[in-house]
Amino acid sequence: MKDAAIVMTAANRVNLPVGLYFIATPIGTARDITLRALDILASADVLAAEDTRSLRRLMDIHGIALEGRPMVAYHDHSGDGARAKLLGALKDGKSVAYASEAGTPLIADPGYQLGRAAREEGYLVTAAPGPSAAIAALTISGLPSDSFFFAGFAPNATGQRQTFFRAFVDVPGTLIFYESPNRVAKSIKDMATVFGADRKAVIARELTKKFEEVLSGSLRDLSDMLATRKLKGEIVVLVARGERDAFTDSDLEDLLKTELKTLSVKDAVASVMQETGVARRKIYQMALQLGNDA
């Protein structure tokens, strides 16, 4: 249903200076869009979108007429041609609006090369901020939000995925990942291996949509749950920062000495890492030193 109060046509467009306007679009509920974003969509000379069909639906919902304006598909597979076309529009003195399929442009979405190229050419590059699945999930997760790190999507292969996660073990803040429903169970299992099974985590899915759901617990708890349940929809995974200060070097040495009595170095390191959440590299180096001392 169109809202008559915000129907935009040529008669009430705003005057946009020449430039590139990044527009955040709803991640679910269509009304989660700013009035400024609607103004830009109604007024830009050229429209570009990661998914032109999604943008047309959004414009229809809010009563924004295309009125003959060009709409260019700009995504990971559109190549240099689409970018050249949009830069050409800027050179012709036109305003260009770019919208991601859902959420904030450039946050795990294409657009980086376009924005950088426009800025290097000296054009105005600005944003109409708004919805972001990462920030929405962090807001309702119950995990600390004073410091956080967005890491995007992990690789597909198990080995590469675990290596990817290890790079964030020592980050002093909440970790935020995007994940697909087909891989989330494997990713949570790998996170438990790398970050420690007792690390607190949250799975937020279908944010702002009818079946929005937030699941929380330890990585072990979530992994056990996903062993018997298939999740659907868009998924954000958040992992709490590690409690590094709870274990001194002396504590780690004592734990290692106990584990090394019955386990190989590799297995002892893995066991202590899961129990403490301390980075594997530190524990491994400590285990090697214990061996040299012995």
Image (tube, rainbow, N blue to C red):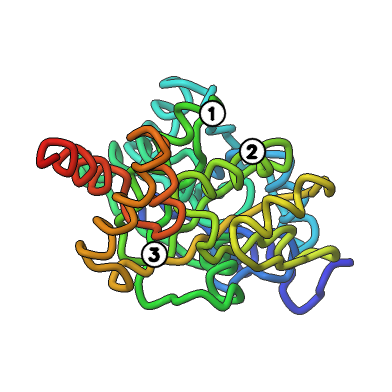
Identify which residue, 204 or 11, lies in the foreground.
204
Question: Could you tell me which residue is drawn at 73 percent across and 70 percent down?
Answer: 31
Q: Which residue is drawn at 10% across and 41% down?
A: 293
Q: Dot 2, crowdedness within 10 Å: few (<14), some or many (≥20)?
A: some
Q: Residue furthest right?
A: 1
Image quarter of residue 115 = top left
Q: Which mark is residue 242?
A: 3
Q: What element carries label 1?
A: helix
According to the picture, the residue beneath numbered tag 2 turns out to be 186
Q: Tell me: residue 251, above or below residue 79.
A: below
Estimate the x, y position of residue 202 in percent, counting from the top left. 61, 64
Which of the two labelled residues, at mark 2 and mark 1, occupies the earlier sequence position?
A: 1
Please say if the residues under marks 2 and 1 sit with CB atoms less than 8 Å apart: yes
Is residue 206 toward the left or the right of residue 112 in the image?
right
At which x and y percent is residue 139? Answer: 55, 75
Question: Which mark sits nearer the N-terminus, 1 or 3?
Answer: 1
For residue 11, side relative to residue 239 (left or right)? right
Q: Is 247 located above or below residue 157 in the figure?
A: below
